[in-house]
Image: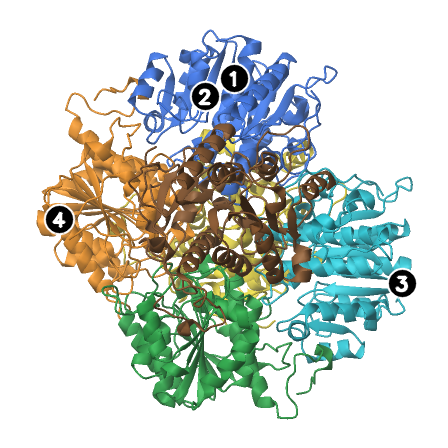
Chain colours: A orange, B yellow, C green, D cyan, E brown, F blue
Amino acid sequence: MRHLGPAFGPDITFLGVPRLDLGDPSQDAGVVILGAPFDGGTSYRAGARFGPSALRQACYMPHNGTRRSLALGVDALTELRVHDAGDLPCYSGEIEQSIQLIERSVRMTASSGAIPVVLGGDHTIALADMRGIAAHHGFGRIGMLHFDAHPDTGGEERGGPLYGHGKPMRQLIESGAVRGDRFIQFGLRGYWPGPETLRWMAERGMRSYEMSEIGARGLGACLTEAFGLAMDDCDGVFLSVDIDVVDPGHAPGTGTPEPGGLTARELLDAVRRAAYELPVVGLEVVEVAPPYDHADITAILGSRVVLEALSGIARRRLDTAEGRWDPAVPLLQRDLNR
Amino acid sequence: MRHLGPAFGPDITFLGVPRLDLGDPSQDAGVVILGAPFDGGTSYRAGARFGPSALRQACYMPHNGTRRSLALGVDALTELRVHDAGDLPCYSGEIEQSIQLIERSVRMTASSGAIPVVLGGDHTIALADMRGIAAHHGFGRIGMLHFDAHPDTGGEERGGPLYGHGKPMRQLIESGAVRGDRFIQFGLRGYWPGPETLRWMAERGMRSYEMSEIGARGLGACLTEAFGLAMDDCDGVFLSVDIDVVDPGHAPGTGTPEPGGLTARELLDAVRRAAYELPVVGLEVVEVAPPYDHADITAILGSRVVLEALSGIARRRLDTAEGRWDPAVPLLQRDLNR
Amino acid sequence: MRHLGPAFGPDITFLGVPRLDLGDPSQDAGVVILGAPFDGGTSYRAGARFGPSALRQACYMPHNGTRRSLALGVDALTELRVHDAGDLPCYSGEIEQSIQLIERSVRMTASSGAIPVVLGGDHTIALADMRGIAAHHGFGRIGMLHFDAHPDTGGEERGGPLYGHGKPMRQLIESGAVRGDRFIQFGLRGYWPGPETLRWMAERGMRSYEMSEIGARGLGACLTEAFGLAMDDCDGVFLSVDIDVVDPGHAPGTGTPEPGGLTARELLDAVRRAAYELPVVGLEVVEVAPPYDHADITAILGSRVVLEALSGIARRRLDTAEGRWDPAVPLLQRDLNR
Amino acid sequence: MRHLGPAFGPDITFLGVPRLDLGDPSQDAGVVILGAPFDGGTSYRAGARFGPSALRQACYMPHNGTRRSLALGVDALTELRVHDAGDLPCYSGEIEQSIQLIERSVRMTASSGAIPVVLGGDHTIALADMRGIAAHHGFGRIGMLHFDAHPDTGGEERGGPLYGHGKPMRQLIESGAVRGDRFIQFGLRGYWPGPETLRWMAERGMRSYEMSEIGARGLGACLTEAFGLAMDDCDGVFLSVDIDVVDPGHAPGTGTPEPGGLTARELLDAVRRAAYELPVVGLEVVEVAPPYDHADITAILGSRVVLEALSGIARRRLDTAEGRWDPAVPLLQRDLNR
Amino acid sequence: MRHLGPAFGPDITFLGVPRLDLGDPSQDAGVVILGAPFDGGTSYRAGARFGPSALRQACYMPHNGTRRSLALGVDALTELRVHDAGDLPCYSGEIEQSIQLIERSVRMTASSGAIPVVLGGDHTIALADMRGIAAHHGFGRIGMLHFDAHPDTGGEERGGPLYGHGKPMRQLIESGAVRGDRFIQFGLRGYWPGPETLRWMAERGMRSYEMSEIGARGLGACLTEAFGLAMDDCDGVFLSVDIDVVDPGHAPGTGTPEPGGLTARELLDAVRRAAYELPVVGLEVVEVAPPYDHADITAILGSRVVLEALSGIARRRLDTAEGRWDPAVPLLQRDLNR
Amino acid sequence: MRHLGPAFGPDITFLGVPRLDLGDPSQDAGVVILGAPFDGGTSYRAGARFGPSALRQACYMPHNGTRRSLALGVDALTELRVHDAGDLPCYSGEIEQSIQLIERSVRMTASSGAIPVVLGGDHTIALADMRGIAAHHGFGRIGMLHFDAHPDTGGEERGGPLYGHGKPMRQLIESGAVRGDRFIQFGLRGYWPGPETLRWMAERGMRSYEMSEIGARGLGACLTEAFGLAMDDCDGVFLSVDIDVVDPGHAPGTGTPEPGGLTARELLDAVRRAAYELPVVGLEVVEVAPPYDHADITAILGSRVVLEALSGIARRRLDTAEGRWDPAVPLLQRDLNR
């Protein structure tokens, strides 16, 4: 599979990292960016097809393929040898073909030894992303950390499309790609789904942190608890970040905004911590819908989610038991030579 | 009074709940939505006339008259038999007639045994809403929980219009509709009003939680204290939610935005808790001004305020002393069969 | 087929006209509005899925099912017994199923004796709309008047999706639904398609009025010429209006805006004239994409295109050879009792 | 009556012209700007209350009280001694009081010998503006040139508010302030009003140029014809410019946008020509609604309407029969020393 | 001078044309795109620094380095071997250095035999662009066709900055780079400059078509006249297109919008015609200011101005006296094999 | 130096405070507002040139020169005799001249005994502001409290402009105007600068509170610690507030938005507390960029930052050891007669 052209607009890479021909064995990429400009699975507002393009260029700094994290003191883009394979040729009207193509590409990436980072696109692609991961790492061997306002476990209702952004998590668990009891959700709220679906979720042993629980117990405590669950008898975790987990005030550019979410800061902290504390084997950032964005703030946030995750991964690899990152240490006293 | 047509745009109901002919005794509504598309009392930005229309349709889910709360496990729209009576024929240029019409409609609704939920419109309508409530429940018998950046107790200054969104609370207290010492305000901040008005407020025994107090003492503690005050020797509470209590970042679509407010999450939590812990006899959500909104985030927030309040009311009715809702319980372990 | 629920948002009808259960023979509709909230065929910006909802409610007047044309002195909504069948349950990810469903619905409508008016959705639906028309009126019996910045006759290139908004016109001509030499296009411009496609178009005898020809010869003269062509040995015409035929200044809310188009006034005049002078058997208004609109100006324009077409049809039916509408007659001297 | 403070925002004057205390006889103003920040008469979108503030400051050049017209070679602001009296203290909820106040202020201005220029506000104020003019110049002595998408002659329907922006022209004619047969309208279009109102208009002898007539006969010819009509046995004309006469593409910031209008250029040319060829005794620019504007283009257009009118008036005073302004003369050959 | 990196955002080329190292003699470019991301000379709204980036990517078609003009039947990007040298490293705070750098780059480009196309940036750069052109082609040997709402001939006033977007044309003429009597302006209007500057312009023999003259005489006639003037004893023309020559309705994204301008269609027609009829030696498109744009319509328009000019140049080279492009010929009868 | 005219738009003062002729000794201003409408130092989005104009008028209350703080019970505008000297005549293309002019004006203001409050403008002006302060108060005698997402200590890289908004803090420390170990930064985050710069910062003894430290330790504790540091052997502090310290959700209208910042409430609380607890000798509010703002929420926030700082200063002067402001005291029990 060759370097993939862009679906829309100019042929750019994520903040200027090198291009990659997907499947070229001579390239030694540690992380591969894949664009999935697909929004044919949205139940309401489309626009996430422009997510990959927006996420790649939403930054005020030079697009030179480097981004050293101030907090973590590491430039993950170079440290992890991040490459960008371009956009997968998804057509939003062809949902099944798109899912298959994405799944194949993610599996191929994982098999090459690289961590796939998929820029959505709507959340339908989680089905493809995680199936691709499981195909390589083994079914049921990877836990899932899912940040979202919605559980995306729909599907028992009659009628409606076969695939879509409201049901990939059910399909993942039913297929065995992910164990239900290693599927952790953060940020649920609002008015969906109904009791039938919730019962299904409970029966599979899912662990869903709804916002009122997060409010009552604290996000930090919930994360700590969840990290343990996700890694119990698993070999790694996949991070699935639906930008609508964040409150619409901080992330207006999304398809199904639900008030009362995390702040942008809480999401960035949580993603950084997860990536630093857990062995992350893949990441997707989905549902960034530029037509509904303002001043690019949602796209920039999505871009930062990618960078925080990568920086956490990179820092994790560098740190030792004695020399670990501690946010309570003042910035200018953190060991800059690490 | 017949079913009221829409003031603007199509003739729709709140998220698809059944229509109601106001005053038709054969209808058995537990909650009645009333639209008050009036913004003739705004001192700055108008636009709240489109609040009812926006609040009725700002939702990405099917408009099928059901909304089961994920947190509370109850579908208040059906549980409480919520109906929508349409828009009251207010003209923004005719402020006195509008207030009288709204007051009459609220009283008629309350007298029918239903809980009135008024979708504003600007905050001028609080005068009508609460007077209508008091006319039925008795003057001074209902406490007021008022979420707002501004106390809306103006009126001592000379000149200016007789009515408006800056003065209904004074007029309510002066008329005896609400006791000053059962009038609780949350979220005040900024640069209004002046000492004369504050002295008047203090003399009436009002309890106004300014944001620096909320910051210093914590919102939870303030709410607990306030709930006790509001119900002392009262038979119920009226919730008045001016969306500008929320920070403009989360609620830009409003007429007089004042930075430094609650987050959307804090408001939703507070409203849910109030509705669950106190006997709510009415609700108004005001000052949602769609022309200044972005991606409908303010309208969706306002819609969620209505739903959280209704869900809290419904949950309160279902719960018993032993079986009470506890946000610290994980979502999928909450009793779903309640 | 029952009354179709709305795809998105509240269940409304076009400016308040009566609802229709599609296929209920007891209803005597002269015109049937069909919503096709589908944008899975867009090659660039999506959002036209919200076109039907926006077109139905973009009007500042009461949504009471009447709209008397000032210019033509006729209320087409009542005169033509316009009904609205709601939205067809299209899913943007399922392009083939969507096309089939729309085609079936249009044919059923035409067979009932009513004129179908399809609110798009992206221009992919032209394939369904016109095939449905031809299935009833006979293949090759209906001429096509196509207003668009793009000919939408793509398809010879390899790769890419099978269906989409860039190719329906080719598929219509190849299938014989429309004769190539009765296919008239207005408003083409820009940088697409290439010579291969143009040659194909020329070989089919298409007549495409590119903007520089319209500029050189005048729109009026071109229309007169075209009207003759379209009706030569045909029984009627189908009007296909892609809102992007209008300059982006007047119609920003569309998916593939191409500068240098008609003014809004020119389009309204042309549509009115076509509907008045020719036997119109169907209409589609497509590519109104609300996320890119401002102050609803594109949606209102699309709504007016529908109304001008319907008003022209109604006026045509009322006028006699002696008493015909003449725009040069002052408004208040036009015969108001017609 | 003192200098009037601003209704909203800072206390500024139109492009920096001198302030005026309304009624101070010592001031020698030739033109007086009056702000009428009132939108309580709008039937749909409010926001015109910010029209005066936007019209005063929508310009990229220094706000120094001078604006020399490039086309006409005259600085009307100084030539005509334009002063700004500030905003009249209108409250949008108090429609009757507002009308009375505006009428009184316009009459007082006219009586002082100055030309009143009223910055709206919604079109309700035409009732006040023209009545104030007639009170000074004599009932029926001034013709009216009315640019608008709507005739604003409503009022026969039952119910609804007593005053509003849809009915001032009827009230003006019924009161005798303006003769029906000296009331000329340009730019009507769309779907309002109905036959009853049109019949009333015809009976009063009104002359309404609907857009299809303007299209068929040409704007220039219509203007020439109209100018003769308006001045027949009258002493002057009042220009009433509703910005919605312009197509929404050029003027999105308005309350009831109707597609198919004049271009901005056509309006500016028409206003300039009217002011140059006819004895203008007053002007109003209404329905500029900043909340719906984009990049201030509507406000700037409204500001230019004022300036073109004033420049035309000033040029008219300077020109002689032999030395008249001729647009066909190249700019740099026009007599610059006039 | 190497390939120049991008000033802002990703490193892209104009619609995907090949990159160019400025000054590399081995490259055989016929046209060179130069980005001048500079807006330090704006007197009002900045933002034109993002013009180059927006102009390069504002297109819904594949960014594949080809754009075949539908009207002219030629793909200028390949026909003319268009290359993109990237953005010149201008800093908006360093106006003098920026002008020098741009001038040097334009001269170098012209000297290489290529036609420079400069993407602004504010109009200050005209000084650099045309001086660079004159440095190669000879002072006074190239006529200037300047489309703009403003003459940009300021400079006699005291104070203010030395350089800026209001004065380059004066500096060009004073320096002798362009002869005053070969300097043709189209589209002037509004309220600037004053008589002193106009007198200066008249004395230099400039020919400035103000909008009222264009209205009175017709754009076509004015263009024909102007083309003759510009080429009288000159060897070529430079096209300077300030996007604000277009009405703000069609081009809101600019710094100093002046209502009453050309339509987008008129500008595209004029540019195409100029490029087809005259020997164009350079082009600049300036004052596209993305922060004030909506749905990218101004950027797309600017992109089309570049393409129309290039297509006209390419068509001119291909046509012979017998076989010339004629817009009155129907599109599908134009010779497609040329 | 006379009263300075406005750079853009009308000649207004901050919320209506009196004007001031800079340097007129007869005026007894306690605080002087200076506008620095300069954005020539921005590395990405410009627009902050309109910051002063926006900050002066972004308020829904009467612009009458008074603003009594609800929290602090003091009207700082009158209490501190705040005057507005207008805009300094900066041109964004002339960066060095602009810096010199601003520095001179700040020094002159400080020397007059007044506290300068500079409304930016981009952060380049910090160099001028603090140098002007130091020139009066003594080099190294004033500590700096710097709220920002970025340290603005760049400058070691080669190339690039000499001055700009990314480097003033380095230049201030290098010049000795501020001691590095009295330079306190709050809110840093993201991906800039690199290790070389951080090492330079550490070597100068700077104290930079990065967001992850603030999250881990709490903002209150960090502020307390920092206040002690800043005042150690210093005579006062200068507050430098870059609005981008706030999360883009609350402050979208800025040039280089970085997600994960403070909430608006946190910034207002921090500024109020700093001004109340420390001897503030000057303030700047920078990087408010209106073109990227929505519904003016960023401008209003910036305006409130100024007011909170001034209110804190005023309250500090009024309070005694026994009678100090305590936010935990309920609003209506705070001593209103202070």
**Which chain does the numbered disc 4 sit on?**
A
What residue sits 38% from the left and 58% below the top?
C45
Image disc number at residue F130? 1
Q: Is residue B130 visible?
A: no
Q: Is residue D142 left or right of residue B94?
A: right
Q: Are marks 3 and 4 on the same chain?
A: no
User: Label 1's element?
Assistant: helix
Say if labels 1 and 4 share a chain.
no
Which residue is found at the position 55% from the left and 35% from the top? E41
Q: Position of residue E287 (x, y in %)?
A: 52, 44
- Which amino acid, by three-letter code, is at mark 2? Pro
Label 2, label 3: how many angstroms apart (C-alpha)?
Answer: 66 Å
- Amino acid carrying mark 1 in the image: Met
Between disc 1 and disc 4, the foreground one is 4
Give the SS element for disc 2. Answer: helix
Which x, y percent locates residue B247? 49, 41
Residue type at mark 3?
Asp
Q: Quadrant of residue E261?
A: bottom right
- The span from disc 1 to disc 2 (Cα, nearest Å) is 10 Å
Label 3, secondary structure: give it. loop
User: In the image, is residue D207 above or below residue F175?
Assistant: below
Q: How busy is the neighbourhood of tag 2: few (under 14 within 10 Å), some, or many (20 plus)?
A: many
